[in-house]
């Protein structure tokens, strides 16, 4: 009962942290009453169903928040389009469904079960941009120069249709010349060329961001592999070209949204990583690689160091990335009022950044969508200033707690996988060092646990040899001791 045990652990952890694990009867009744919008009859804005919209996501993703497409203009610039599901059209502020979403603020993805922010009838059906379905959306379009610079942007409601449901890995393997074209791409005339245009523009935008100091961080993410109900392995989930297309298009869309709201002089939620929490330790780590960083936080200098190290030692670069991510500290939501300017996002090297492209699974994005729609049609703002400030605080707190739940269940899954390997020795790297404990990640399989003996003098980024001495699936404990 591996998966069943992990679901029970997830439910307990979520309840302890104040999440609503199940939808209320009132919310489920609302879902039943929501008739699917007759898009053809009620279509606001532009009818863009003819464009070659596609979704690119994980193989098993069912909550499709956005579609993308690109168009080459006569002057050789490229107009990119991001269509974001109009979730607000069906989920009304103050409804029972909305109250559940506001409390949790995010979908929680655990190894045992996914706990969606919205009922699945909405998030994977009525508000999901599903294949060959007409859907209401908010479109963010931007004109991108041949060096990746955004020259102009526009935002408006529209009606779209998803012409191909694509998966990251197969699209990336094709773009990188490793595998043949996916059947779903070949089936739509002109789609292959359009995806290549999207790929080229994304690489140009990424290149420009890195020139401005965006951090190229590459961590080792893993997901459990189950055979039936039993965990068999942890599979690496690596970045690839298709993920970079979506990532860079979303960064562009979120930046355009933030600037649009600032231009309309309305308050907005911003997403940011402030100056690094432990810059002095990042400087120390760089010195171990014979690189000198300035004493004050400098994203361009850090980006240059990371680029050099990625080229010099790509195999171990994810370990360095993980150390830097831990030392940068978590992101947070803040409110930017019209008369103020919020700090930028340190890791992305962008000044204007919000979360707007995933309203099916993040409440800040749904909130931004409501503000955006009010700004577009000149209606009253959906939140007062005080409400927005409280919402930013709550969303930050819940996101951090959701990450803790996901990590706990991931650790329980890892403890399950390692339970038969007590006494084994592993190469490891320190990923966290504080008064509350020292943490290490073994390299194969990539699993993190606590260093309970021999942690003196060990700090983030240190390499060491450890022995597995204890696991506890229920608590997600994996304990190591340092060995010679």
Image (cartoon, rainbow, N blue to C red):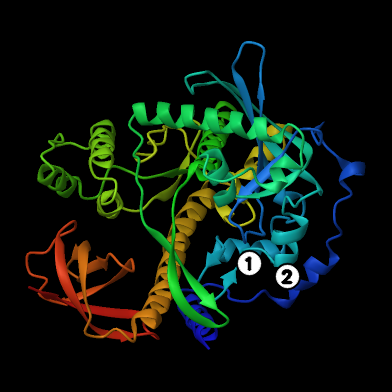
Of the numbered discs 2 and 1, the one sitting upstream in the chain is: 2
Q: Quadrant of residue 174?
A: top right
- Is any part of residue 338 visible from this angle? yes
- Is any part of residue 380 visible from this angle? no
Residue with the mark numbered 1: 100
Relative height, residue 11 to residue 121 (above, below)? below
In front of the other: 382 or 296 = 296
Q: What percent of the width, then of the height, locates residue 121?
A: 75, 65
Q: What percent of the width, then of the height, locates residue 274?
A: 33, 43
Relative height, residue 131 to residue 377 (above, below)? below
Determine whether label 2 and label 1 are within 8 Å by CB: yes
Q: Quadrant of residue 24?
A: bottom right
Q: What percent of the width, then of the height, locates residue 392?
A: 48, 52
Q: What percent of the width, then of the height, locates residue 46?
A: 80, 31
CA gap between label 2 and label 1 equals: 8 Å
Q: Is residue 252 left or right of residue 447?
A: right
In front of the other: 324 or 39 = 324
Relative height, residue 134 to residue 236 (above, below)? above
| Residue under the image location 24 percent in, 79 percent down | 479
Q: Residues within 10 Å of mark 2 (few under 14, many from 20)?
A: some
Residue with the mark numbered 2: 27
Q: Is residue 337 left or right of residue 155?
A: left
Relative height, residue 379 to residue 90 (above, below)? above
| Residue under the image location 53 percent in, 39 percent down | 177
| Residue under the image location 41 percent in, 59 percent down | 221
| Residue under the image location 52 percent in, 32 percent down | 202
Q: Quadrant of the C terminus?
A: bottom left
């Amino acid at each position: 009962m591996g998966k069943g045990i992990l679901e029970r652990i997830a439910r307990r952890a979520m309840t302890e942290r104040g999440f609503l694990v199940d939808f209320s009867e009132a919310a489920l009744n609302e879902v039943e009453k929501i008739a699917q919008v007759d898009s053809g009859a009620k279509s606001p804005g532009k009818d863009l169903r003819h464009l070659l919209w596609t979704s690119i996501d994980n193989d098993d993703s069912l909550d499709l928040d956005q579609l993308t497409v690109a168009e080459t203009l006569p002057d050789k610039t490229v107009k990119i389009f991001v269509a974001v599901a109009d979730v607000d059209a069906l989920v009304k502020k103050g409804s029972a469904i909305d109250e559940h979403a506001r409390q949790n603020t995010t979908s929680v993805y655990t190894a045992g079960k996914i706990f969606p922010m919205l009922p699945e009838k909405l998030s994977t059906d009525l508000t999901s941009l599903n294949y060959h379905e007409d859907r209401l959306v908010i479109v963010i379009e931007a004109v991108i120069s041949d060096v990746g610079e955004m020259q102009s942007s526009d935002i408006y409601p529209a009606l779209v249709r998803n012409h191909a449901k694509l998966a990251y890995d197969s699209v990336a393997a094709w773009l990188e010349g490793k595998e043949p074209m996916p059947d779903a791409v070949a089936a739509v005339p002109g789609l292959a060329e359009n995806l290549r245009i999207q790929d080229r523009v994304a690489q140009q935008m990424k290149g420009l961001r890195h020139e401005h100091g965006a951090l190229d961080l590459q961590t080792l993410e893993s997901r459990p592999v189950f055979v039936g109900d039993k965990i068999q392995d942890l599979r690496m989930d690596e970045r690839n070209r298709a993920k970079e297309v979506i990532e860079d298009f979303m960064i562009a869309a979120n930046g355009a949204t933030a600037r649009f709201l600032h231009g309309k002089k309305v308050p907005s939620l911003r997403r940011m990583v402030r100056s690094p929490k432990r810059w002095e330790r990042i400087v120390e780590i760089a010195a171990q690689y014979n690189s000198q960083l300035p004493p004050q936080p400098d994203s361009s200098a850090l980006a240059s160091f990371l680029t050099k190290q990625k080229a010099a030692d790509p195999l171990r670069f994810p370990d360095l990335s993980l150390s830097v991510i831990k030392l940068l500290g978590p992101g947070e939501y803040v409110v930017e009022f019209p008369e103020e300017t919020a700090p930028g996002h340190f890791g992305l090297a962008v000044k204007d950044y919000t979360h707007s492209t995933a309203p099916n699974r993040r409440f800040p994005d749904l909130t931004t969508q409501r503000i955006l729609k009010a700004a577009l049609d000149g209606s009253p703002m959906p939140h007062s200033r005080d409400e927005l400030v409280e919402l930013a605080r709550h969303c930050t707190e819940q996101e951090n707690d959701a990450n803790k739940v996901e990590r706990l269940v991931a650790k329980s899954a890892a403890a399950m996988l390692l339970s038969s390997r007590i006494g084994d020795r592993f190469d490891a790297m320190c990923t966290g060092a504080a008064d509350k404990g020292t943490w290490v990640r073994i390299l194969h399989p990539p699993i993190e646990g606590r260093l309970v003996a021999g942690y003196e003098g060990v700090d983030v980024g240190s390499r060491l040899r450890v022995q597995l001495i204890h696991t506890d699936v229920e608590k997600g404990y994996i304990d190591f001791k340092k060995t010679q």
